[in-house]
Amino acid sequence: MKLFKMIKNFFKNIARFIDRKIILPITKLIVVITKKYDNSGKKIENWLSKRNTLLFISLILALAVFILIDRKIIVFTDSSAELLQDQPVEVIYNEEAYVVEGLPETVDITLIGSKTDLYVAKQSSTHDVSIDLSGLKAGTHKVNVDYNQNTGNIKYTVNPGVVTVVIYPKVSETKTLSVDILNQDSLDSKLAIDSIDYDTDKVVIKGAEHQLKNVAEVKALVDIDNLVSKEAGKTTLTDVPLKAYDKEGEIVDVEIVPEKIDVDVTISSPSKTLPIEVKPIGNVSFGLGISDISTNVNEVTVYGDDKSLADLKSIPIEIDVNNLKENKKYKVEIPKPVGVKSLSTNNITVDVTLTEATNAKFEDIKFRVDNLDTDKYYIEPIDGEASTQVDVTVKGAKSVIDSISSKYKEYIYPYIDLSGYTEGTYEVEVQVDGLENRLEYVANPKKVKIKIVKK
């Protein structure tokens, strides 16, 4: 459409030129001659009034104007300029033997000429820009950027027209391949990546020597979002890209052979069913004890990786019973243990029932020593075997106390914590744990005197 308008305007300009510069002067001349030679003027007028005469005159004049324009004797338009931005550069060199730095990826080309020629040039499908490094050896070189387009009457400039490049010999090195998993959170929380398998764990990196020194690791980028199936089972990912990184985690631009690999991703759904363990925090009001703690859910199925689940024995849930005076129902969110991604249920209801409390005393329970560096030290009784034992007073509902009284040493665990202690004699606080969470425990004495001896 633009070309049609340009052609139309071209011929309009020709018509105006002929009318202004040729037809009008000739007409004036004929009028002057006619006035001087009246009789002859009538003959000329009759001759000009003939249709064929005017047709031949127009044809001759059109041919004359065409020749003038074609020979650049008459110019209707001034020169213009067009900018071709971001033209890709083709580089010619031995890629197997050398690495080149300093090459521009694109250049800008400015074309100067008539609007018609510029229009034709811009419609061209190719604007070949190249840098020829063939024949150059390792070192620093200044080279020209060549524009290979046949531009006819158009002048051009290339920016940049000259570039400085550094050519390095290409060397290679073998690296161990590792895996980086991307978008792992897009998996269902009940699923886990069980394994990622690939054919080789060695790749070759190629580049300049100073580039290879910067490579700390090469990783296969396994994107979970590219999995066709995100269900449990094995899925093959093809054409997984490899990237080289420095010690700061930045990408290093080196050649990697192979560039891509295929990997097998195995997805599993590890789970484990664990009991709920409710632990009251604090002491209920004076004279009262917890006779019962019940939950609407007794066990929970947890999902995570096998390593995290292996160490889990129960799901601990804490409730605050400090100064509690009456029965209470707690609605508790179940905390996720470390490594657990999902739970079969996220909330439970805990019912705490109170009753009148009573006390009971259990004697001669040997206390446990925790966190002593036994490779260097051991405990020496100060007052004989009796000094390693304490009594424990238990407070709570009578029915609960009675249930442990015959085997209390299996339920009650007094202990001392010796974290950071070294050789010497110390008075240390005795703490008490008990398997029965409904009871409160107090050691008697509350502190014991111990002697730590170096081995």
Image: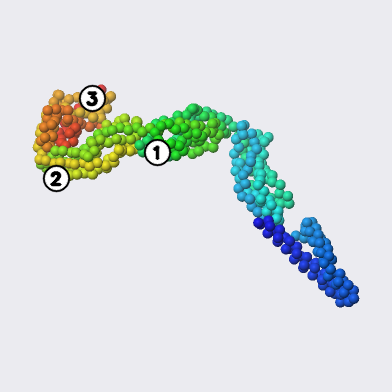
Q: x%, y% of residue 50?
A: 84, 68
Residue shown at 15% from the left, 33% from the top: 443
Give the position of the N terminus as an image quadrant.
Answer: bottom right
Tell me the kind of residue under disc 3.
Answer: Tyr
Q: CA distance from mark 1 to mark 3?
A: 50 Å
Q: Is residue 158 above or below residue 23?
A: above
Q: CA distance from mark 2 to mark 1?
A: 46 Å
Residue corresponding to mark 1:
187
Residue corresponding to mark 2:
325
SS for callout 1: loop
Residue shown at 34% from the left, 34% from the top: 304
Residue corresponding to mark 3:
378
Left or right placement of residue 325 versus residue 332 in this view: left
Q: Earlier in the sequence, mark 2 or mark 1?
A: 1
Q: Is residue 329 above or below residue 309?
A: below
Label 1 vs label 3, nearer the camera: 1
Question: Does residue 32 appear in the picture of this structure?
Answer: yes
Q: x%, y% of residue 238?
A: 50, 34
SS for callout 3: strand
Q: x%, y% of residue 201?
A: 48, 28
Q: Residues within 10 Å of mark 2 (few under 14, many from 20)?
A: some
Label 2 vs label 1, nearer the camera: 1
- Check residue 389 in the rendering and tell me which mark sits there, or answer none: none
Please tell me which residue lies in front, 24 or 46. Answer: 46
